[in-house]
């Protein structure tokens, strides 16, 4: 029996030919509908937490279950997932980095104290700059170790940056002011400056240290004033030991008009010489400042080189020496005196007569 072979080309053509409808027109096949792609799972905000979780799971099943439980408690913000495990790992890493940075700053401070080629101001300046560098490096190191995706905080970056700008404006201003003060050496630890309180009373104090935000000034009564660095840049400051520690102290003194002025001058010079803190060079000076209502006004001017020890106490010591010398040589320190002139009138005469009659009647 003979079977007729079907040509291969005909079979291919018939299978590839488009289908036709009853009218002889080709039928249009609709394009296939793409299937929806599955949503990407939210990414962890702390990549280091995921790696540490896998390392703990490979070591202990009990620890792995605990970590899985902590990781299950999570909060999803946008496409970022933050769990309790992530927060625990992040806080631990931050704590370790902070402790490490603090230890490094202490080590640098100890090394700078042993650097004999740098004076105290240069040591403090280098220490502050190195501290800033260390903490900035620690911040970026912490971000790198945790693998934090900073884009997760993009929603809050605008408001957060604005708050940081306003909140730290004075802090950065005081920080830069402190560095500038150390660079030009106008204010340095150990200087003696005048400090005014809120009432306006002025007292002399010594700078104990210059901090990031403020300087610490200790007065003679052991009161510690914290003055912002920015105030020292924009306000007038009296620095008693800026270029020299020699300070001139003035002591005004008045004597009676009948006194021997040459003897008074000699005694004032002797009083300054007998006071231990008064310098011999530059020498003291006694000046007659004027003729007052009831005294001849002198002024004793002398020098000291330790203003941090106080100005009022050295003036008191000199006054004590002056008092003793004046008592020994009969020099009178006058007190204010006033002459009272009474004008006569009829009423005043009657008052005097009545007082005389009353006095006479009382004695008779």
Image (tube, helix red, strand yellow):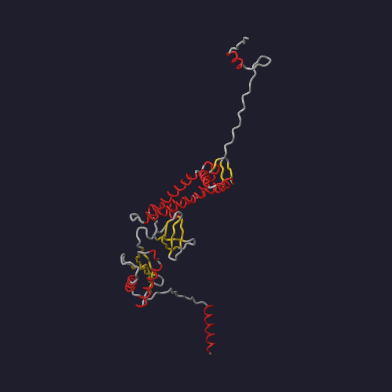
In the image as oriented, which residue stretches furthest toward the front? 1
Whole-percent x and y of residue 299? 37, 68
The quarter holding residue 114 reads bottom left
Q: Is residue 354 left or right of residue 338?
A: right
Q: Nearer the viewer, residue 200 or 178?
A: 178
Instruction: Reply above or below: 256 against 310.
Output: below
In the image as oriented, which residue stretches furthest toward the right? 22
In the image as oriented, which residue stretches furthest toward the bottom? 364
Whole-percent x and y of residue 105? 42, 53
Q: Quadrant of the N terminus?
A: top right
Determine the residue positioned at 46% across, 54% down. 213
Instruction: Reply above or below: 301 against 13.
Output: below
Instruction: Reply above or below: 101 against 272.
Output: above
Q: Nearer the viewer, residue 97 or 249?
A: 97
In the image as oriented, which residue stretches furthest toward the top? 2
How many discs appear?
A: 0
Determine the residue positioned at 34% across, 60% down. 244
Q: Nearer the viewer, residue 208 or 225?
A: 208
Q: Nearer the viewer, residue 177 or 41?
A: 41
Whole-percent x and y of residue 231? 45, 55
Whole-percent x and y of residue 250? 38, 66
Q: Is residue 268 left or right of residue 26?
A: left
Determine the residue positioned at 46% across, 60% down. 225
């Amino acid at each position: 029996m003979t079977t007729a072979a079907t040509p291969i080309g005909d079979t291919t053509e018939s299978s590839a030919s488009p289908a036709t409808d009853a009218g002889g027109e080709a039928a249009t096949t609709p394009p296939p509908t793409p299937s929806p792609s599955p949503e990407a799972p939210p990414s962890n905000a702390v990549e280091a937490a995921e790696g540490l979780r896998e390392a703990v799971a490979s070591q202990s099943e009990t620890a792995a279950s605990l970590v899985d439980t902590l990781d299950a408690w999570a909060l999803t913000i946008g496409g970022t997932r933050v769990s309790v495990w992530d927060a625990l790992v992040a806080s631990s890493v931050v704590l370790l980095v902070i402790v490490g940075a603090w230890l490094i700053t202490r080590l640098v401070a100890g090394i700078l104290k042993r650097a004999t080629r740098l004076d105290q101001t240069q040591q403090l300046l280098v220490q502050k700059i190195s501290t800033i560098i260390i903490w900035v490096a620690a911040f970026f190191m912490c971000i790198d170790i945790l693998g934090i995706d900073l884009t997760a905080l993009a929603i809050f970056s605008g408001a957060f940056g604005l708050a940081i700008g306003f909140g730290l404006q004075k802090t950065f201003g005081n920080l830069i002011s402190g560095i500038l003060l150390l660079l030009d050496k106008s204010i340095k630890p150990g200087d003696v400056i005048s400090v005014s309180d809120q009432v306006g009373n002025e007292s002399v104090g010594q700078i104990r240290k210059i901090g990031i935000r403020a300087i610490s000034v200790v007065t003679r009564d052991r009161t510690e004033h914290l003055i912002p660095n920015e105030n020292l840049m924009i306000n007038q400051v009296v620095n008693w030991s800026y270029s020299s520690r020699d300070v001139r102290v003035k002591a005004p003194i008045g004597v009676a008009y009948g006194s021997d002025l040459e003897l008074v001058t000699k005694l004032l010079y002797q009083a300054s010489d007998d006071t231990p803190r008064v310098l011999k060079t530059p020498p003291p000076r006694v000046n007659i400042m004027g003729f007052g209502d009831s005294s001849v006004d002198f002024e004793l001017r002398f020098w000291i080189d330790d203003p941090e020890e106080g100005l009022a106490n050295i003036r008191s010591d000199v006054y004590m020496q002056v008092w003793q010398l004046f008592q020994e040589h009969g020099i009178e320190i006058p007190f204010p005196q006033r002459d009272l002139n009474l004008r006569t009138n009829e009423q005043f005469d009657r008052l005097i007569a009545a007082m005389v009659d009353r006095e006479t009647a009382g004695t008779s």
